[in-house]
Amino acid sequence: MAPGPVPLHPDVEAALSLPMIHHRTPLFDQILKKVLNNLKKVFCTEEPVYIVSGTGSAGMEACLVNILSPGDEVLCIVSGKFGERWAEMAAHFGYKVHLLTVPWGEAVEPIEVEKILTQNPQLKAVLCQACETSTAVLHPIQELGELISKCPHTLFLVDGITAVGAAPLPMDEWKIDGLVAGSQKAFMLPTGLSFVSFSKKAQLSLTDSTSPRFYLDLRKEKAANEKGETFYSSSVTLIRALDRALDIMLEKPLEEWLKKIQRRADFTSFCTFSLRLDLYSQSPTPSLTAIKVPEQVDGLKWRLRLEEKYNLTVMGGQDQLKGKILRIGHMGHITDFDLLAMAQALYYSLEDVNIELPIDAEQFWIHNNKWLEKHP
Ligand SMILES: Cc1ncc(COP(=O)(O)O)c(C=O)c1O
């Protein structure tokens, strides 16, 4: 239950083990066409969504180099590790980076962004994570989209790697100009693919960006996709598994799928509070929960104990949060049994490290079962 890579759905695993087919065949063309169409439904956009054979960071890079040019001024909202990475990447490509640093654990205040935009109408883009995975913070993307859309020359680029398919993030409705997602998160696939889409406003820059781009040049991919193909060899195995994953995600309206993930987050918060622990994030995301490690506990040891004794993979904190938080993911194939097992593992592992628990084990089990029954 890490916040990516995530447990795979059995049907996705089955799709991954199918015999290989060639990517320039009518059979694969059909799959690709369906996948590209279904990706649009998860992104909630009318615009094309491109598949990049590369992890989320490749998608972040594709999002920048296809629409920005060296010398362009960009505002990077940095509230954790992934914000830092995107800002570093932007600087690397020669964009002039303005930083808006937000304390870890907090969401950005739209008014702060508005002030910077008013003083800097020349900004070509604002870069922000939808969910900053290192802190489990969800940023106010809808509000930001609204205010950035009023600036005629500024694009809103969103790293939705742990948000697309996990939290509401309708690209067109929320006026997002560039959106990136990653396969090993809500899409329930192994690591290896990322997905990128641009608004009509951003597409105007697609042809004249002068950033260096070759493999990640989405103009080639656009032309190939229009002919029903990918430009380079397709990641057939992952795309075929993606087809299955998208069928599962879109079986019912997308909102139903998102509710399932929100329910896992709500359950995890419920358990956290039952154990008299606190959440770290002041703006919790549905994709993952960050629990503050009690002061008297060594967070690194706690995590190791969960892994080794209870067979539960969760993530710890990074950098300044090392040993201070535990991050539990809610994306992927997670059953109610997994949720109960996760809760029990938290309980007993805390007992192992001599934390006095406010509830006895049996009561905790019963409460958790009741919660799940009451919230189908
Ligand atoms: C918000 C966010 N951005 C970017 C990345 C980087 O993605 P990748 O490791 O797939 O390159 C991650 C990965 O966890 C992430 O959570």
Image (spheres, grey):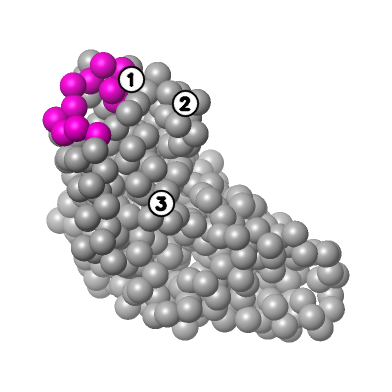
- The quadrant where residue 86 appears: top left
Residue 354 magenta-drawn? yes
Is residue 322 visible from the viewing direction of this image?
Answer: no
State if disc 3 and disc 1 touch (CB < 8 Å): no
- Mark 2 or mark 1, which is nearer the start of the sequence? 2
Which three-letter amino acid code belongs to the residue tagged 3? Phe
Residue 56 is tagged as none
- Mark 2 or mark 3, which is nearer the start of the sequence? 2
Q: Nearer the viewer, residue 40 or 86?
A: 40
Q: Where is residue 253 in the image (x, y as percent from the top left)?
A: 39, 80
Mark 3 nearby-residue class (10 Å; few <14, some 14–19, many ≥20): few
User: Which residue is found at the position 18% from the left and 21% from the top?
Assistant: 356
Q: In this view, does 312 lie above or below 250?
A: above
* Magenta stretch, overall SS: loop
Q: Position of residue 116 (x, y in %)?
A: 22, 53
Residue 309 is tagged as 2
Q: Is mark 3 on a helix, strand or loop?
A: helix
Residue on which disc 1 sits = 352
Q: Where is residue 324 in the image (x, y as percent from the top left)?
A: 30, 25
Which three-letter amino acid code belongs to the residue tagged 1? Asp
Q: How far apart are marks 1 and 2 (CA)?
A: 10 Å
Residue 261 magenta-drawn? no
Residue on which disc 3 sits = 337
State if disc 2 and disc 1 touch (CB < 8 Å): yes
Whether label 2 lies within 8 Å of ligand 1 gets the answer no
Q: Is mark 1 on a helix, strand or loop?
A: helix
Extent of the magenta region: 350-361
